[in-house]
Amino acid sequence: MRINKLDGLRGIFSLMVVLFHYRSEYIPDFIHNNFIIRQSGYFVDFFLF
């Protein structure tokens, strides 16, 4: 069952997961050191439900 209203959050969370996997040399420090970006590996679970 898919909830279409959550597609916007899925898009935002997918970008955050991509930023999580980038190395610190490729993105600015204020993004890499952001707490939410550093913990965004947990957003992968959001795609499974």
Image (cartoon, rainbow, N blue to C red):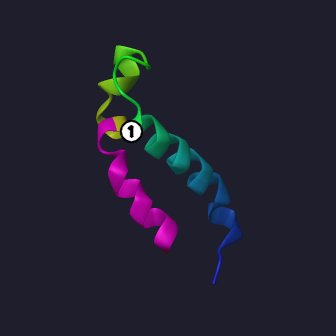
**Horizontal relation, residue 5 to residue 35: left or right:** right
Q: Position of residue 10 (x, y in %)?
A: 58, 56
**Horizontal relation, residue 26 to residue 14: left or right:** left
**Residue furthest bottom in the image:** 1
Is residue 43 in the magenta section? Answer: yes
Q: Write the start and end of the magenta stretch as one range.
A: 38-48
Q: Quadrant of the N terminus?
A: bottom right
Q: Residue at x 46, y 64 (%)?
A: 46
Q: Which residue is mark 1?
A: 20
Q: Quadrant of residue 24?
A: top left
Q: Amino acid at mark 1?
A: Phe
Q: Residue at x 51, y 65 (%)?
A: 47
Q: Work out whether 25 lies above or below 36.
A: above
Q: Quadrant of residue 37?
A: top left
Q: Position of residue 7 (x, y in %)?
A: 66, 59
Q: Quadrant of residue 6?
A: bottom right
Is residue 40 in the magenta section? Answer: yes
- Secondary structure of the magenta portion, mostly? helix
Q: Residue at x 58, y 53 (%)?
A: 9
Q: Position of residue 23 (x, y in %)?
A: 36, 27
Q: Residue at x 43, y 20 (%)?
A: 27
**Residue furthest right in the image:** 4
Q: Position of residue 15 (x, y in %)?
A: 54, 41
Residues packed near mark 1 inside 10 Å, few (<14), some (14 to 19) or many (20 plus) = some
Q: Work out whether 22 lies above or below 45.
A: above
Q: Work out whether 3 lies above or below 32.
A: below
